[in-house]
Amino acid sequence: MLIFGLLQSLYHGSSKRVKKFVDETIYSYSVLKISTPDHSCFLILVCFVFHYKYTCRNMKIRAAVLEQMGKPLPYSVSKPLTIQELDLEGPEEDEVLVKMWYVGLCHSDLSVINGSRPRPTPMVLGHEAMGQVLQIGPGVDNVSVGDLVSCIFVPGCGQCEGCRIGRPTTCIPGAEANKRGVLLCGKTHLFRTRAPEKQPVYHMGGTSGFATHAVLSKHSVIKVDPSMPPQYAALLGCGVITGVGAVTNSAKVTFGSTVAIVGLGGVGLCGLLGAKACGASLILAVDLEEQKLAKAKEFGATHTYRVQKKDSLSKTVENICQLIGPFHKGLDYAFEMAGNGPALQIAYGITKPGGTTVTIGLPDPAVDLNIQQVSITAEERTLIGSYLGSGVAVRDLPRYVELYKKGVLPLEKLVSGIIPLNQINEGFDMLEKGEVIRILVNLKDEN
Amino acid sequence: MATVDKTIPDHFRGILCRGIKNYTVEEEIAARDTLFEGRPKEELLPGEVLIRVTRCGICAGDAKCWSGAPMFWGDEIRKPYVETPVIPGHEFVGEVIAIGNKEEKSQVQVGDQVTAEQIVACGKCLYCRKGLRWLCAPHDIFGFHRCVHGGMGQYMRFPQNSIIYNIPKRVSPSEAVYVEPLSCGVHGAHRGRIELGDTVVVSGCGPIGLGMVAAAKLAGPGRLIALDCMDSRLDIARECGADIVLNPLKSNVVKDIQELTDGYGCDVYLEATGNPKSVEQGLYMIRKNGRFVEFSVFKDKTSVDWTIIGDTKELDIMGAHCSGDNGYKVAIDMILRRQIPVERIVTHELSLDNIIQGIQYVNEGKDSIKVAVDPTK
C-alpha cells in the first residue's frame, strides 16, 4: 500500500512527459495482459523497455553543427561545420521523426555560415531535405510511418491569418520560430550530449537536415510520391518550389511573355525551367559567369548576357535592352535570383515600363533597397517579394512531381554530385565558388 | 502621296457579298469604289498599305453570314452588322505592294508578307480608350464593313489605323492564313489564366479549339484534355499537344474528368463548340472556383440551372472575343517555332470560284477544318 501511495505521488508530481510515458506503458500492459494473464510484472518490464526504446529516450544522432558564423574560406581548411553526436528528442504532439536521406547544399545555408544571414548558434544547418518518416507523434494526420517526405523550411501553422487565406509563406509563428532557431512548438529538440549541462542546439528552418535524423513539425513535411527518385525529391522543398513558384505563383507569367532571370544558381535555373514550362517566348539569362550562362542555354534560355563588373548599372541595362531587340523596351518580367543588391538593380532596370520585377534573394539584412524611387511611379512598376515561391507546398509539390514525370521539369540536370556527410565543408567550398548547381549530402547510407 | 513600286489595277477579281446566300465571284470589282472609297487610288494616305492577297480563310462567322444568321443581318432586337456590297474575309495574308508615305520609318516594307488585325480600332470609343481595342464600339472588322473590304479578292487596302504584322517568308501563305484563327485561340487560352500543372479541358476541336489546345499547352498544364465528337479531329488535337482525347458520344466525359481529378473537376474549361450541350457539360465537369472560357458563336439558346455559377461552384465565367491584345504576336511566334501542326489544320485551299463549296464545307464541318480561298488561282 505504501509503495503504491509513493508511486502515485511520484506519478502526480512528475512532468507531463513522464505521466504520458507511464500512461502509455500501463495501456500497453493492459492490452498485453488481456492476451497473457500470467507474469504481469514481467509484462510491465517488457512494456517499459519497449516504450523506452521507441519513445522518450533521447535518440543519438550525428549532425553537421555550425559553431560560429563568419569563418574564413576555404571551408575545407577552416571547417565551420563539424560532425558531432547530438541528442534528438521527440517527436511530440504534431511532430514527426524523419530519417534523412538526401539534403541539398543551398546558398541560404552558405549565408548562415558566412554570417550574411545571422542565426543563433550552435545550429544544425540543412533545409532542402527529404527523408523517410520513422515515427509520428500524436495528432499527425498528414503523413504515416514509412512515407517519403520533402521538407519545407517555412512551416505553415495553419491557423494564423496568412495560413488561413492560402498564403502559408507569410505564416507569422513559422517565421518567428525560424528566426529563433526552434521548431513551431517553440522549443529546440536538439541537445549536446557531452556538455557539462544540457546545451541546446538550434534548428535551421525547422528542418536541420544535415543530420542522420531530424524531428520536424508536421507542417514542415509533405508526403512525396515514392516513385519519384529521392535525390530529386530533395530539391522540391527549396530550389524547385522557390524558383518555379516565383514564376508561376508570384508573377503568374503567362505564355508568350518575355522573362529575364538574373542569377543562375540552383534556384535561378529552377526559375528558368519554370519560365520555360509556363510558355515564356523569350527567356534571358543574366549572370557574371560564363559557365553558368552556358548551363542556362542548356536549360532553355533563348538569350544570355554576361555582366561585366566594370560596367556601370546603366551601361549593363542599355546593353541588355539592345540585346533583346528594338521591339521590346525591356522585359515583361524580370526575376532577381542571386541574393544581392546589384542583381535586383539590374533586374529592375531591364523590366519594361508597366512590367513586373520579382525578387527572391535573401541578402544581408544591412542591404537596403537601392532603386530610383521616381521611376516606380513614372513607369508604373510592380515589385514583388517572393518567398518560397509564394507556394502552398501541399498543393505545389505534387504538381512539380507530375511535371517532373512528364519531362517538363528535368530536375536530374540540377544535381551536380552527391557527397558523404564528412565532405560537407568541401561541398560548401564548391558551392561558394559556383562550380556546382546542387550537391546533395547522402544521409541515407549514413548511420 | 504614295511611295509605290507598283499600284493595283483599276479592276480586280474577288467575291462580293450582296445579301443572304448572295456571294458571287466578280471579275471586275472597281478598286476606286471599293478599296479607295471613291478616292483616286494614287492618293494613298500616310500609313495606308496596299496588299496583294495570297490567301484568305473562311470563318464559321462568314459561313453563318452567308446563311443569313440574324447577328449579321439583324432581327427585332439587333441592328444589321454587315454592310453590303462588301468583299468578305478577315483571315487574310498577302504581300505589300505599296505604302503611303510616313514620316517615321514604317515597320513594313514593300515585298513583306503581312497580315493585319481583323479589327480596325477607332481609338476613340470607351473600349479603345480602356485598351480593349478588340471590343471597339464601331467594330470595323475587315469583310463586314465597307470601309474595310476583306481578303477574298486579289487586293486589299489596310487603313491608317490597322495594326499590321510582318510574317517572315519562311512561313508559307498556306500556313500564314491560320494566323487569325490561332490568334483567337491564343486569346481564349489566355482568358483561362492557366497555371502550371492545371487540368485543362478544351471542348471542340475546330480551328479555334485546336488553336486553344496548342496555346494552352504552352502554359504547362499538368493534363491537357481535348473533347470532340469526331475521332479524326481528336487525332489532330493530340498532334496539337493534348495529353488525353475523349469523345463525348463514346464515354461519359464528365465522369472521366472527375475520376482524373480525384472528384474535384478540371481547373479550366475552354468552350469552343458553340453547342449548348458542351456548355452544360463544362459546368458539370469544372471544379469550384474554376475558370470557364466561352468563345463560340451559338445557333441555339443554352439553358442551365444558373445556381451552379454562384452558390454551387463560385465560378469565373470569362467570355472571349477576337484576339485580345497580343494574340497575333503569340500566334505568329507559335507558327514560326512550329508549335502547332498548321498543315493538318488548313485542309482545303480553293479558288475564288469555289467559294460556295468552301462555305458548305465549313457549315458541314465534317471533311474539313480550316478552309481557305486562294485569289491567285
Image (cartoon, coloured by chain):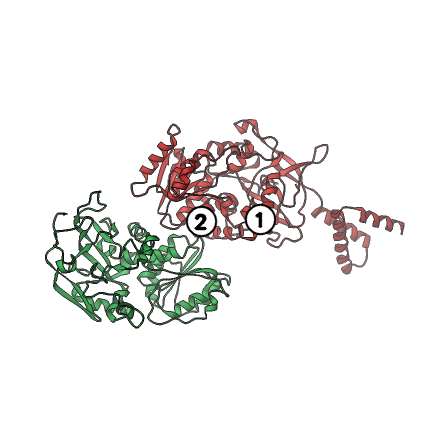
Chain colours: A red, B green
Is residue A362 placed above or below B370 in the rendered structure? above
Dot 1 lies on which element? Answer: loop
Q: Which mark is residue A156?
A: 1
Q: Between residue B4 and residue A422, name the one nearer to us.
A: B4
* Number of marks: 2
Label 1 Cα neighbours within 10 Å, binned few <14 / some 14-19 / many ≥20: many
Q: Is residue B313 left or right of residue B250?
A: right
Q: Amino acid at mark 2?
A: Thr
Dot 2 lies on which element? Answer: helix
What subunit carries mark 2? A
Q: In which quadrant will I find the C terminus of chain A? A: top right
Residue drawn at 72 percent across, 34 percent down: A197
Label 2 Cα neighbours within 10 Å, binned few <14 / some 14-19 / many ≥20: many
Residue drawn at 39 percent across, 47 percent down: A276
Q: Is residue B267 left or right of residue A90?
A: left
Q: Position of residue B22 (x, y in %)?
A: 19, 70
**Mark with earlier residue (2, 1):** 1
Q: Is residue A176 left or right of residue A349?
A: right
Is residue A286 placed above or below A145 in the rendered structure? above
Q: Position of residue B102 (x, y in %)?
A: 19, 45
* Residue position for label 2: A248
What subunit carries mark 1? A
Q: Position of residue B262 (x, y in %)?
A: 51, 61
Q: Amino acid at mark 1?
A: Gly
Q: Position of residue B225 (x, y in %)?
A: 40, 61
Residue A203 seen in this snapshot = no
